Image: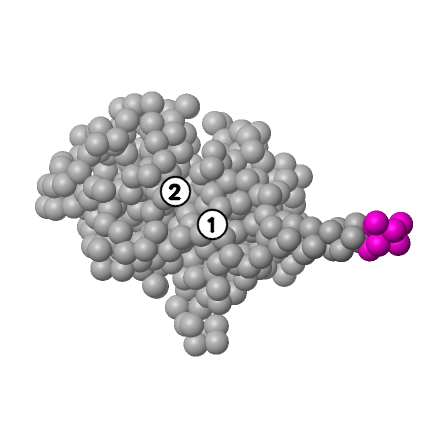
Amino acid sequence: MSRFAELISVGLLALLLGCVISPLRSGGSGGGGTGGSGTIYVSNVSANTILRFAGASAASGNVVPNATISGSNTHLTTPQYLAVDSSKDRLFVANQGASSVLIFESASTKNGNVAPDRTISGSNTGLSAPVDVQLDIGRDLLYVADGAQVLVFGSASTVSGNTAPVRTINAGFSINAMLLDATGDRLFLANGSSNAIDVYDGASTLNNTVSPNRIISGSNTQLSTPAGLQIDNLGRLVVSNFGAPSIAIYANASTANGNLSPTASVNGSNTKLANPSQIAVASGQLFIADGTAASILFYSNLSSVTGNTAPNNVITGANTGIARTGGGSGPATAKGIALDSSR
């Protein structure tokens, strides 16, 4: 072969390999982000669906979810907040419209019109309009916020059917959101009507009518219809405010009390927040469900974010499954969010 022909052959081979390899390296428009970590589950309250996005930390724009759980077999009816047990690949759904809690095993594999593996419902459960679910994995307990009470179910890993709760915690106000700090055995309840966070110690033994050990409230707190609660890797309490769209962060969640000012507040037009609801936090990352904005917002470095700071990524658009109908005038969609950081 002549030197010229050899060069031509090498060039054609490189061009062919480039055409083959390039598409494989492309993220495309479906199934979340390229090279990202974690899987998020999102409840679409108006479409009665659960969406799953893999590579969540890199997912952005008008991406197609990896899976959409929807259809009559799912029994999803106005799904609210979510909880995930990463160690067991198990998803819990506060299914408000059907007065039930739905549990999906092998959640990372579920797709389409699939039935839940277990359903908690019936007159013995005390469930009426559940809004939030939280897990104490070590004690195998499931906490469900429903109206002005928290229903605690034993054997969370197997509970099903018309089962009575082992304890009922009466808060005395309509609960917007709930956070269980299982390590500290501490319960946080968001009181939207009084713009307060009530904190209860000894959560695993609380029963009947209880009084909080501490209350975060007052004008300095900047609380405005608190709707999402988490504790970050620095031990700070992170709160989403539905009323005045913002994220408020308070130092030392275990002792936070009274009319204290947040150490950081994320707010302003750059944040793209409209009415944030449930939030998910892990490894310094923050995911926010915002139904009015029909978006999932992501901040990669929660430890330093503050002020009018734009999110790193925004999942939004018609392909995502959380878009609002009627040119943006339809009902809010994204409500609950849960993060499985191990997948």
Pick the residue in front: 74 or 289. Answer: 74
Residue 238: numbered disc:
none
Which region of the structure is painted magenta?
1-8
Residue 108: numbered disc:
2
Residue 201 appearing in the image = no
Q: Secondary structure at mark 2?
A: helix
**Residue at 37 percent of width and 55 percent of height:** 68
**x%, y% of residue 122?**
12, 46
Say what amino acid the circle numbered 2 marks: Ser
In the rendered view, would you say 65 is above or below 341? below
Q: Residue furthest bottom?
A: 326
Q: Is residue 7 magenta?
A: yes
**x%, y% of residue 185?**
37, 24
Q: Which quarter of the figure has residue 269?
A: bottom right
**x%, y% of residue 197?**
42, 41
Say what amino acid the circle numbered 1 marks: Phe
**x%, y% of residue 338?**
42, 43
Q: Secondary structure at mark 1?
A: strand
Q: Is residue 219 left or right of residue 90?
A: right
Magenta segment's dominant SS is helix
Q: Which residue is mark 1?
A: 53
Residue 177 appearing in the image = yes
In the rendered view, would you say 132 is above or below 70? above
Q: Residues within 10 Å of mark 2 (few under 14, many from 20)?
A: many
Pick the residue in front: 2 or 66. Answer: 2
Mark 1 or mark 2: whose residue is earlier in sequence: 1
Q: Is residue 179 magenta?
A: no
Q: Residue furthest right?
A: 3
Q: Which quarter of the figure has residue 340?
A: top left
**Residue at 48 percent of width and 64 percent of height:** 319
Pick the residue in front: 28 or 44. Answer: 28
**Residue at 33 percent of width and 27 percent of height:** 137
